[in-house]
Amino acid sequence: MNNPVKQSDVVCWDKDMDNSISIFTETKLKDKFDGVRVFTTGLDSGYLGAGMAVVMNSSLAKHVCKVSEIPGWLMSIKLFFKNKLSVSILGLYADASLAVQFSQAGEINSIIAKTVNKSFFVILGSNFNEDGSRKCASFKKCLDLELINSLVRSPAVKMPTWENFRSVKRTINYVFVSPNLVNAIIRRNVLGISEHFNTDHQAVLVSLGLGGLLDMQLNSFRKQANRDRWKFDFKDANESKWINFKCATLVNATMFSDKFTVSVEFSDLDAI
């Protein structure tokens, strides 16, 4: 996806679809196109497939406050909205090579975990470029962190997202969301896009209805904090409950101090 004409076709498709956020892998998409903001990462040499781009419409791009990356493999973009709520967008490309997969897995999984723990909402678009004999380590990490495959309980969950020239088909592209976004999913589907530009992948499309959700979530966290009176029940503790408690605590505390944070991880508590 490094041909200039093909890159232009990719961005034209994105604009025609009126996507808010698109994540493309195996590309060194250039970072300047009219009407959208493009965040890119790649490697200067080595693996041909390494590289990805996150294309974001201009209205959302205004909320971007932090961008970080593992060159060629992972991009993390954090957006802040009113009420100090954050949305993190993660783009991930996991190469099929075992050498790359294992050498990068620890660093990649660490960033995914930190992002999930420090953001109210998380959306992760991925190309787990795996073969049929093994699962990518980051795929398992997403499940361990209770991120939800957006196609679950949808007929599209069984649809292949990749097909090679030998007609071998697999599902290797996913959109994961944090549990508090599941009820906001309006539509999800796997869509053929080869008529728009040459690719052996299908597009995983997920539509989220976020109107008012940020305000609703804020009120929910406030109610939880008031109900729990700043206490955490260790008897039935798990990582998910600890993350929710940290969110509720953070929302209330940041009304008094912008520097407040809860840095303790559940693994630290579980070891006590």
Image: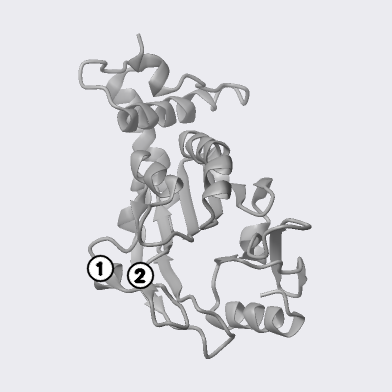
Q: Is residue 161 above or below residue 228?
A: below
**Precedes in sequence: disc 1 or disc 2:** 1
Give the class, few, some or many, for how many residues have Cα within 10 Å of label 2's Cα (few <14, many ≥20): some
Secondary structure beneath dot 1 equals loop
Quick one: label 1, few (<14), some, or many (20+) residues within 10 Å? few
Look at 59% across and 82% down and name the residue there.
Answer: 13
Q: Residue furthest bottom?
A: 195
Residue 40 relative to residue 240: left or right: right
Tell me the kind of residue under disc 1: Ser
Determine the CA span between mark 1 and mark 2: 8 Å
- Badge 1 vs badge 2, beta-carbon distance below 8 Å: yes
Q: Amino acid at mark 2?
A: Arg
Rendered view: 26 above or below 199: above
SS at badge 2: strand
Locate the C terminus by quadrant.
top left
Residue nearer the viewer, 194 or 43 = 43
* x and y percentages locating residue 64 in the rendered image: 66, 50
* Residue drawn at point x = 26 percent, y = 17 percent: 233
Please give the residue where the numbered disc 2 appears in the rendered image.
Answer: 188
Q: Image point 48% across, 27% down: which residue?
A: 250
Residue 67: horizontal and vertical position, in percent? 68, 47
* Residue underneath mark 1: 154
Task: Please report the residue visible at 43 percent of the width from the left and 71 percent of the height from the top.
Answer: 205
Number of callouts: 2
Q: How does the figure colour the protein chain or chains?
A: one colour
For residue 107, say whether it is visible.
yes
| Left or right for 26, reference 31 | left
| Residue 145 pos. (x, y %) | 38, 39
